[in-house]
Image (cartoon, rainbow, N blue to C red):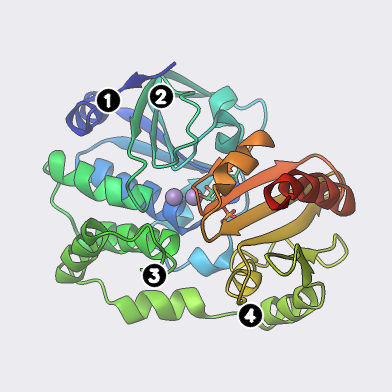
Amino acid sequence: MSKICTLSETGELLKQANTIVIVSHVSPDGDTLGSSLALMHALRSLGKEVVMNVDDDIPAVYSFLPGIQEYRRFAAGEAVEADLLVVIDASSADRAGNALEVVNASAVMNIDHHKTNTHFADYLYLDADAAATAEIIYSLLLTMAVPLNIDMATCIYEGLYTDTGSFKYSNTTSNTLATAAALLKLGVNPSTISDNMEVKSRHQVEMLSEALKTLTFLHDGRVAFVEIAPELYDHNIDTDTFVSYPRYIEGVEIALLFKQVEENLTRVSFRSKAVDVAKIALSFGGGGHQKAAGCSICAPLKEAEKTVLKALEELFV
Ligand code: AMP
Ligand code: MN
Ligand code: MN
């Protein structure tokens, strides 16, 4: 079990450490990357030695984020020493990839906003009401009295932008928008961020058109899913937004995206209007939020689909 920390205790622990490894979760998104990079810029401004890690490829769409080139992927068997290992926006240890084995840290800290958090770290700052971990990072930097610069502001804005679906999901609060407003005052230009985020490669649109051909409805149109077969999957192509197509179809209450990413591994994304999909994802070892969750199933595509769709059946009896 973790020691639950306040924001000022979290700030104190960070200030006490000199060498810090910041870990973003596997299948990295704009929140884990933006939050981690903002924290990196802040800690370096305080003179800390910071190493950035993610045990995965980073989608090209994030290459505009200041500091993104700092990320390292640890080799298995590598040994890294640190005072503190900070895992960002991850609700369970497996989401940290190999960092917990590679890094020999005096303590592990976890900063997160998933209600499914498993309390795997020594120290936990958890705010399940925060729209994004980036919203927490903004408050943390204020608490630590770190002067924010444009790089930190851009990275924090990116986290908010990603996890709120560009400020439109139900997790968007007045605090989220007040944070975004403060970031604009620091010089963030919303259209620069959205131009970078919304641009699609030709391959991505071609993959989307293939994925949409698999659109399937179940339970009188209350469930819809699309799939990406292994022969189509390309880890260099960002598919994070594909689930929004079934999600916004009239009458759909639960939308899913299934993608087979390895021979025996299928990633599942859940989106819902009301049903708590985090509970369903958690039952498969994943997690997330009530209306947006995910899990990985150790099975090929069709088998994973069968298992997950069976679990949904009881909701529609
Ligand atoms: P995604 O569908 O990948 O965009 O993920 C939706 C939400 O579920 C995000 O908050 C993720 O952090 C969370 N999530 C996705 N996959 C997993 C997983 N395997 N374990 C825990 N949380 C996950
Ligand atoms: Mn995330
Ligand atoms: Mn997040």
Mark 2 and mark 1: Cα distance apart in space: 20 Å
Mark 1 and mark 4: Cα distance apart in space: 42 Å
Picture coordinates of residue 33, whole percent (x, y): 45, 53
Instruction: Tell me if 6 is positioned left or right of 282 in this view.
Output: left
Q: Which amino acid is tagged 2?
A: Ala
Picture coordinates of residue 114, whole percent (x, y): 45, 41
Q: Secondary structure at mark 4?
A: loop
Q: Which amino acid is tagged 4?
A: Ser
Can residue 139 be seen here? The reply is yes
Mark 1 and mark 3: Cα distance apart in space: 30 Å
Q: Quadrant of residue 284?
A: top right
Mark 2 and mark 4: Cα distance apart in space: 39 Å
Q: Which amino acid is tagged 3?
A: Lys
What mark, if any, has residue 201 been given in the picture?
A: 4
Mark 4 and mark 3: Cα distance apart in space: 24 Å
Which marked residue is nearer to the observer: mark 2 or mark 1?
1
What mark, if any, has residue 5 been given in the picture?
A: 1
Query: Nearer the N terminus, badge 1 or badge 4?
Result: 1
Q: Secondary structure at mark 3?
A: loop
Residue to which mark 3 is pinned: 168
Instruction: Tell me if 58 is positioned left or right of 228 in this view.
Output: left
Crowding at dot 1, Cα within 10 Å, few <14 / some 14-19 / many 20+, comes out as some
Up the image or down, 226 lies above or below 194; here it is: above
Instruction: Tell me if 185 is positioned left or right of 41 in this view.
Output: left
Query: Nearer the N terminus, badge 2 or badge 4?
Result: 2
